[in-house]
Amino acid sequence: MIKEENNKSFDWVYSVLGLVCGIATAAVISGSFLWSLFGGVLGLIMGAVFLGSIVKGRKY
């Protein structure tokens, strides 16, 4: 049997999770729309940091 490699990239999942969790956290804490946007940006940044530092060297 020939083993087929999985070449699909799931890097976008970390960005989406960071965005959703950042918006949800800011909305619960502050209740304001503008703070929710700021939380979403921070979530995207944290997702990128997580992807660049922890997941980068990981072998699947």
Image (tube, rainbow, N blue to C red):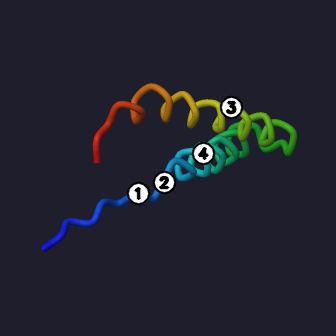
> Disc 3 on helix, strand or loop?
helix
**Identity of the residue furthest to the left in this view:** 1
- The residue drawn where x is 72% and y is 36% is 39
Assess disc 3: are there few (<14), some (14-19) or many (≥20) residues with their C-alpha within 10 Å of its C-alpha: some
Front label number (3 vs 1): 1
Quadrant of image for the N terminus? bottom left
Which residue position holds label 1? 7
Q: CA distance from mark 4 to mark 1?
A: 19 Å
Give the number of the disc on residue 15. Answer: 4
Q: Earlier in the sequence, mark 2 or mark 4?
A: 2
> Disc 4 on helix, strand or loop?
helix
Q: Earlier in the sequence, mark 3 or mark 1?
A: 1
Going by the numbered disc 1, the residue's amino acid type is Asn
Assess disc 1: are there few (<14), some (14-19) or many (≥20) residues with their C-alpha within 10 Å of its C-alpha: few
Going by the numbered disc 2, the residue's amino acid type is Phe
Q: Are marks 4 and 3 in contact (CB under 8 Å)?
A: no
Task: Give the vertical position of 13 relative to 37 (above or below).
Answer: below
Front label number (4 vs 1): 1
Which residue position holds label 2? 10
> Disc 2 on helix, strand or loop?
loop
